[in-house]
Image (tube, grey):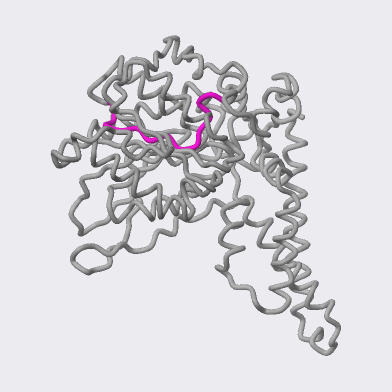
Amino acid sequence: MKYMLTYDLMETIRNTNQWMGATARAFAAYPAMSMTTNPMVEWIGAWGEVAERSFARMVAKPDWGIPNVTTEDGKDHSVRIMKLVEKPFGDLIHFKVPGRTPRKRRVLLVAPMSGHYATLLRKTVISLLPDCEVFITDWHNARDIPVSAGKFDVEDYTLYLMDFMKHLGSDLHVIAVCQPVPLALAATAYLAELDPAAQPRTLTLIGGPVDPEANHTDVTDFGRSVTMGQLEETMIQQVGFKHPGVGRMVYPGLLQLASFISMNADTHMTAFQNQILKVAKGEAADHDKHNMFYDEYLAVMDMTAEFYLSTVERIFKGRDIARNDFVVDGHKVDIGKITTVAVKIVEGEDDDISAPGQCLAALDLLTGLPASKKAQHLERGAGHYGIFAGSSWRNNIRPLVLKFIDENSPAAPAKLKRKPANQNTAA
């Protein structure tokens, strides 16, 4: 499948479905169609509206859409998105709130590079903005990056994180979500050796595969059941002439989306059937629950082939992080070198992507870190999405993370400093 033809074929299918949706919607909107009472016309128009929007979203990067922030002066302040560091494969951005006193908590959100844009963490950003200065890793769509920019694999990702942490300084609290959890752990450990002063104060790891073998899921089972040759042959394609990254080998976003949907095909089918019915009845809205979710879920980005393949081979199959045998730029990183950074693990009881135990394995690797600087929390009844963006995050996990940050900050009250870091550990 490693040809431009297959890449362009998928885009052609997507584009054709978008056109068919637009055509059906326009057909049903003709005034002459109102002369008949046939409900099929409404159904055609409703299907067209849902289809056009859905297939159009697959190639559009979502807007951040961050609302104004109300501060202690009672005024609403707009949020400016500022690029602090620009790199070929990703930027470090700051959600700056002009006119308000800078917050003491400085948080770097490490977004996944797993098919969706960093905007997947929009709700996480919004929830943290009132209390924190928020920064995030904003990864680029691989199809828009020229081949001349070179490769980008798990080692490059780790080096990017180290550069971002160095730029922001040591008075920093890092929160890594899902896929980058093991790489954020490795980046911190490497900094502990090369530049200890650049380490963050805390590292919160949320639902990531530090040790995929700790608790199997469909994701880990798939990683074990296929060979690297099979993955390279069936998942990797070459970007076509339409994009700046022409010729680059990638794991296409559209192919990733097909995999995402196949995992819960019945659920997605029911959701779209219900939405078509609502549109036909005039009950749907531009920003209703369905559209808000799928506008983000369907927006996918290509991943460089080397990043995808090295993630499967080194994180899932070889378990390099779990075995403390991860090499970056020719140097073996020792997780045990982390001795001062407080680490908190957050997992969801019902997480079917990174099951409980996979992220918790990080604590066993931190052999040089005192027990008082280790913490863990298992959120009962929460799935993967809920532990960083849902009600579980807002109501339970977010307050615990902020408390953990305060307990391990130099300006924390004495009574908080005396508490062990695992005070919030769930039984």
Q: What stretch is highlighted in magenta?
A: 199-211
Residue extending farthest front: 427
Q: In which quarter of the image is the C terminus?
A: top left
Task: Give the total number of marks visible in the rendering.
Answer: 0
For the point 62% across and 50% down, which residue is it? 59
Can residue 52 be spotted in the picture?
yes
Q: Is residue 202 magenta?
A: yes
Q: In which quarter of the image is residue 22?
A: bottom right
Q: In which quarter of the image is the N terminus?
A: top right
Q: Is residue 321 magenta?
A: no
> Is 111 on the left or on the right of 21, as rendered?
left
Residue 27 position (above or below residue 324): below
> Is 153 on the left or on the right of 25, as rendered?
left
Can residue 139 be spotted in the picture?
no
Residue 374 x %, y %: 34, 28
Residue 234 x %, y %: 75, 29
Q: Quadrant of residue 54?
A: bottom right
Residue 413 position (above or below residue 156): below
For the point 34% across and 43% down, which residue is it? 401
Residue 424 position (above or below residue 50): above
Residue 26 x %, y %: 74, 73
Residue 28 x %, y %: 78, 77
> In this orientation, which residue lies closer to the viewer: 167 or 392?
392
Q: Quadrant of residue 301?
A: top right
Majority secondary structure of magenta residues: loop
Residue extending farthest bottom: 35
For the point 48% across and 21% down, which residue is it? 155
> Is 214 on the left or on the right of 155, as rendered?
right
> In this orientation, which residue lies closer to the viewer: 85 or 50?
50
